Image (cartoon, grey):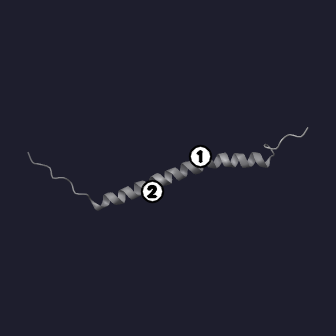
């Protein structure tokens, strides 16, 4: 049996981690825009139609 030599850290691994970090950040941004964006849009739409104004008797 041959003993396996420990693998040396390759310089590409750091590049992969940076790309993974960018992917996570862009995923968070997309979820934020598509999650919060429609809610804000609905609130602005309802406010423009007078939904939040107190009714006058």
Q: Is residue 52 left or right of residue 9?
A: right
Q: Quadrant of residue 46?
A: top right
Q: Residue at x 61, y 47 (%)?
A: 36
Q: Residue at x 37, y 56 (%)?
A: 17
Residue hosting label 2: 22
Give the Cα separation between the discs numbered 1 and 2.
Answer: 19 Å
Q: Residue at x 41, y 54 (%)?
A: 20
Q: Is residue 53 left or right of residue 28?
A: right
Quadrant of the frame with the C terminus: top right
Element marked by disc 1? helix
Where residue 38 appears, as percent x and y from the top left, is: 65, 47
Q: Residue at x 34, y 59 (%)?
A: 14
Quadrant of the frame with the N terminus: top left
Residue hosting label 1: 35
Element marked by disc 2? helix
Where residue 6 appears, as percent x and y from the top left, is: 18, 52
């Amino acid at each position: 049996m041959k003993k396996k030599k420990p693998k040396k850290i390759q310089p590409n691994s750091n590049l992969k981690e940076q790309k993974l970090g960018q992917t996570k950040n862009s995923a968070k941004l997309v979820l934020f825009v598509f999650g919060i964006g429609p809610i804000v849009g609905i609130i602005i739409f309802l406010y423009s139609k007078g939904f939040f104004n107190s009714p006058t008797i």
